[in-house]
Amino acid sequence: MVKREIYNIRFNAMASSCNVLLVARGDSAAAELAQVAIDEVHRIERKYSRYRADSVVSRINGAAGGEWLELDEETDGLIRYAATLYEISEGRFDISTGVLRRAWDFSGRSPPRVPTCDELQGLLALTGWDKVQRDGRSLRLLQAGMELDFGGIGKEYAADRAAAALQACGLECGYVNLGGDLSVIGPQPDGAPWPIVIQDPRNSDASIAGIPVAAGGLATSGDYERFFEVDGRRYCHILDGRNGYPVQYWRSVSVLAPLASAAGSCATIAMLMGEQGLSFLESSGFAYLAQDEQGRIYRKGLH
């Protein structure tokens, strides 16, 4: 009988380095299982990427200011989830702020530049959840030029869906990791949790914690993945939907929740809420680890 072994299959998706870690009997079985997860991640990327002209997001944005669009069940579910996040965050988490990337460039391909207040105000006129009209599963963006951006929820959702696809194949041990956002299916074969390292936001070669995870979703939101500095101030890609400016208070927030989607949303909202984020994390009921701008660590349920 072929012994079960741990396999680590790496791939790239959603502009991130990703991997599927699983337990299988032999190379071919591991490759076949991993491909199930990889295919699901790529399916979601194709469907919701703002960079693809044939994606659902591009179709929605292209119709802005025009006709109503009938959404499929999956997309409608994500829109409803985004609406809930908007309400919970009091307007900070807003997927209708896609146009703000015209003002903020975190790609590193252009010299760092902070947009003017007038630039941001002009773009903010094209944002706002009140301009996203919904009727059942139909949706319309009220103004031409508006853009939805699923980047704030897409990666965690893909991790959950890929993990669910593996579970449907009978996998009981392993996880899906999409650029640091994990959906854990089950513990190691001996029952021990997987040791997950949380990166130091100011030193990519170091960590601030090691977190044992046996099941659920673990996601981190931080100011260190996409950012630039001007006059000694750091500007990161997490933008407050109310004013269009990057968050400042937290370096990183990691959350452990039943699903990666919930963990990622909670972590990002905490980042957006600044100093109030700690109270939000406490009220969520999830375990968390957060580091503020001074380097101080706050944690609950993660040791």
Image (tube, grey):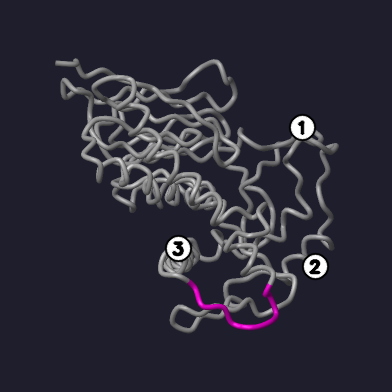
Which quadrant, please, contains the C terminus? Answer: top left
- Horizontal side of 258 relative to 206 (left or right) equals left
Which badge, 1 or 3, comes first in the chain's sequence?
3
Q: Label 2 near label 1: C-beta < 8 Å?
A: no
Mark 1 or 2, which is nearer the eye? 2
Mark 1 or 3, which is nearer the eye? 3
Which badge, 3 or 2, comes first in the chain's sequence?
3
282 or 229: nearer the viewer? 229
Tell me, yes or no, whether the highlighted magenta stretch contains residue 70: yes
* Disc marking residue 78: 3
The residue range painted magenta reads 63-71
Could you say whether the residue bearing mark 1 is in a helix, strand or loop? loop
To which residue does mark 1 refer? 232
Q: Where is residue 12 in the image (x, y as percent from the top left)?
A: 55, 33
Q: Label 2 near label 3: C-beta < 8 Å?
A: no
To which residue does mark 2 refer? 122
